[in-house]
């Protein structure tokens, strides 16, 4: 069991405030056969010094210093350096439960999964200190899905999350799949592609990861036009899902269309409507190229009303959505 090397990719950019806590949670894992890859993406604070300190005291750690190229390229650098049969990705301001990797690994082996995802929390006091290996290896905590069902759960964000962290992957799934350069929302281009290469994908209903939300974290930030990357990502996903899993076409289409509506509404709430006019027009072009009556046959009545209303009168959609309710 301990012959299986797990590579851990940690992209780092100016996280000196939280970095020690993250690295301590990694180096103190109960599962010890680790290949820890630190990618310092041109940090201008003391992150590099902290990394070097940990390299000097733990031979499992490798440090790569590179010019600032963004989170996607930092993760790609790490992906190219993987030595283990399994790998995971961790944000450098997050914290692993002391048994995170051992729990994920043993459950993964127990059910012969290609990918396993644990649960996470954004509240530190929800970390269960009593969680141990013995009480975590239990099939009642695990759900296993085939490729199509897992993709369905990922698309609707029910059992799986788009984020790459708190998952353990077989390295053989990776092939040439990399994060897209220059994209702010890069996870939505990447995660589902690994699902496409997997046959058995599982979730573990145990909290093993602490995601730190703050002003500089992606999930904690206020709206930015950079979030429009998600529209292109979901459009690309729709085309691939339509070809490979026709039964999921309507879910992938709905995800894309609702993403267009959401981002359009956010842009309309901006104080500078003239400045973002170009983005609103781009959204409508992409939305209109996929909106077809036949494609909406599986949509609920409320969803059809919302989507058709947006198509005809996009600036009235917020009022219509409020009338219909936000649960769509």
Image (cartoon, helix red, strand yellow):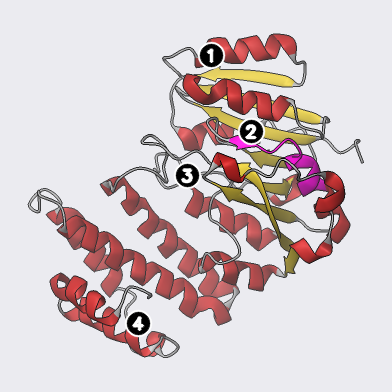
Q: Are marks 1 and 2 in contact (CB under 8 Å)?
A: no
Instruction: Residue under label 1, please give it.
Output: 48
* Res. 123 visible in picture: yes
Q: Is residue 36 magenta?
A: no
* Res. 200 visible in picture: no
Give the mark toward the camera: 1 or 3.
1
Where's residue 17, x and y in %? 48, 21
Between 171 and 28, the one nearer to me in the picture: 28
Name the secondary structure under disc 4. helix
Q: Which mark is residue 180?
A: 3
Name the secondary structure under disc 3. loop
Q: Residue at 61%, 34% (x, y): give it.
A: 95
Q: Residue at 58%, 41% (x, y): give it.
A: 125
Given the current orientation, which residue lies at the most extreme left position?
274
State which quadrant residue 244 falls in: bottom right
Query: Is residue 73 placed above or below 222 in the rendered structure?
Result: above
Q: Which residues are magenta?
A: 95-105
Q: CA distance from mark 2 to mark 4?
A: 40 Å
Q: Is residue 100 magenta?
A: yes
In this image, 69 relative to 304: left or right?
right
Name the secondary structure under disc 1. helix
In primary-sequence order, the first of circles 1 and 2 is 2
Where's residue 75, x and y in %? 56, 35
Mark 4, residues whose alpha carbon is within 10 Å: few (<14), some, or many (≥20)? some
State which quadrant residue 199 falls in: bottom right
Instruction: Residue under label 2, please give it.
Output: 9
Q: Residue at 30%, 73% (x, y): give it.
A: 289
Name the secondary structure under disc 2. strand
């Amino acid at each position: 069991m301990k012959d299986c090397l797990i590579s851990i990719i940690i992209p780092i950019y100016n996280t000196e405030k939280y970095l020690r806590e993250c690295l301590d949670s990694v180096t103190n894992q109960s599962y010890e056969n680790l290949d820890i890859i630190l990618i310092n993406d041109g940090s201008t604070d003391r992150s590099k010094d902290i990394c070097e300190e940990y390299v000097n005291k733990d031979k499992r750690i490798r440090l790569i210093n590179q010019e600032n190229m963004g989170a996607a390229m930092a993760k790609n650098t790490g992906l190219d350096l993987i030595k283990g049969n399994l790998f995971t990705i961790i944000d450098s301001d997050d914290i692993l439960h002391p048994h995170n990797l051992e729990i994920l690994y043993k459950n993964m082996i127990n059910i012969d999964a290609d990918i396993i995802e644990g649960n996470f929390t954004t509240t530190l006091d929800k970390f269960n200190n009593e969680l141990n290996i013995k009480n975590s290896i239990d099939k009642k905590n695990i759900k296993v899905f085939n490729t199509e069902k897992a993709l369905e759960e990922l698309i609707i964000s029910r059992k799986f999350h788009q984020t790459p962290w708190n998952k353990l992957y077989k390295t053989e799934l990776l092939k040439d799949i990399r994060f897209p350069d220059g994209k702010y929302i890069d996870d939505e281009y990447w995660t589902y592609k690994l699902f496409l290469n997997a046959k058995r994908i599982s979730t573990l209903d145990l909290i093993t990861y602490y995601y730190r939300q703050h002003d500089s974290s992606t999930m904690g930030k206020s709206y930015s036009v950079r979030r429009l990357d998600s529209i292109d990502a979901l459009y690309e996903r729709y085309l691939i899902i339509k070809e490979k899993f026709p039964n999921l076409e309507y879910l992938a289409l709905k995800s894309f269309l609702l993403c267009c509506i959401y981002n359009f509404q956010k842009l309309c709430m901006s104080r500078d409507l003239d400045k973002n006019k170009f983005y609103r027009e781009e959204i409508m072009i992409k939305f209109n190229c996929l909106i077809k009556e036949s494609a909406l046959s599986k949509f609920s009545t409320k969803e059809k009303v919302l989507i058709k209303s947006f198509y005809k009168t996009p600036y009235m959609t917020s009022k219509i959505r409020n009338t219909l309710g936000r649960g769509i």
